[in-house]
Amino acid sequence: AFGQAHSNHRKVAADGESREESLIQESACKEAYYEQRMQELQAELRQARNILTNVQSENERLATLTQELGE
């Protein structure tokens, strides 16, 4: 009986360790995915800011042109 209980305890402990390893691996995969996604979004943000700056410059140029034509 003692041997059986000890064997069961070892199996439960091994299953727990296996589950913990699976969760750690799953967390590592999620972390890698979100790190990659964050880098992609940061690149998109930089691009959007550049586009905004260009559009603002073009708007200023057109406003100046419009003002000159109105004079």
Image (cartoon, grey):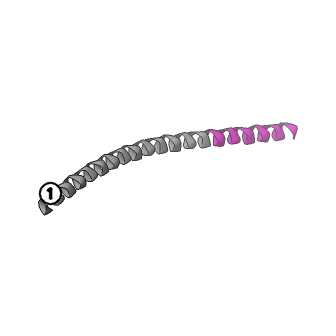
Q: Position of residue 17 (x, y in %)?
A: 68, 38
Viewer-side residue, 11 vs 67: 67
Would residue 16 appear left or right of 33 to someone viewing this image? right
For image coordinates 30% across by 48% down, the residue present is 53
For image coordinates 74% across by 39% down, the residue present is 13
Q: Secondary structure at mark 1?
A: helix
Q: Position of residue 60 (x, y in %)?
A: 24, 53
* Quadrant in which residue 42 is drawn: top left
Write the start and end of the magenta stretch as one range. 1-21
Q: Position of residue 35 (x, y in %)?
A: 47, 41
Q: Residue furthest front?
A: 71
Q: Residue furthest bottom?
A: 70
Would residue 41 appear left or right of 70 to someone viewing this image? right
Q: Does the segment drawn in magenta span residue 9?
A: yes
Viewer-side residue, 31 vs 65: 65
Q: Position of residue 11 (x, y in %)?
A: 73, 40
Q: Which residue is mark 1?
A: 68
Which secondary structure class fits the magenta region best?
helix
Viewer-side residue, 36 vs 21: 36
Quadrant, the N terminus: top right
Residue type pointed to by label 1 = Glu
Q: Is residue 56 above or below residue 39?
A: below
> Looking at the image, how many numbered discs can be counted on the residues?
1
How would you rate the neighbour count of disc 1 (Cα within 10 Å): few for under 14, some for 14-19, many for 20 or more?
few
For image coordinates 82% across by 37% down, the residue present is 6
Viewer-side residue, 13 vs 28: 28
Quadrant, the C terminus: bottom left
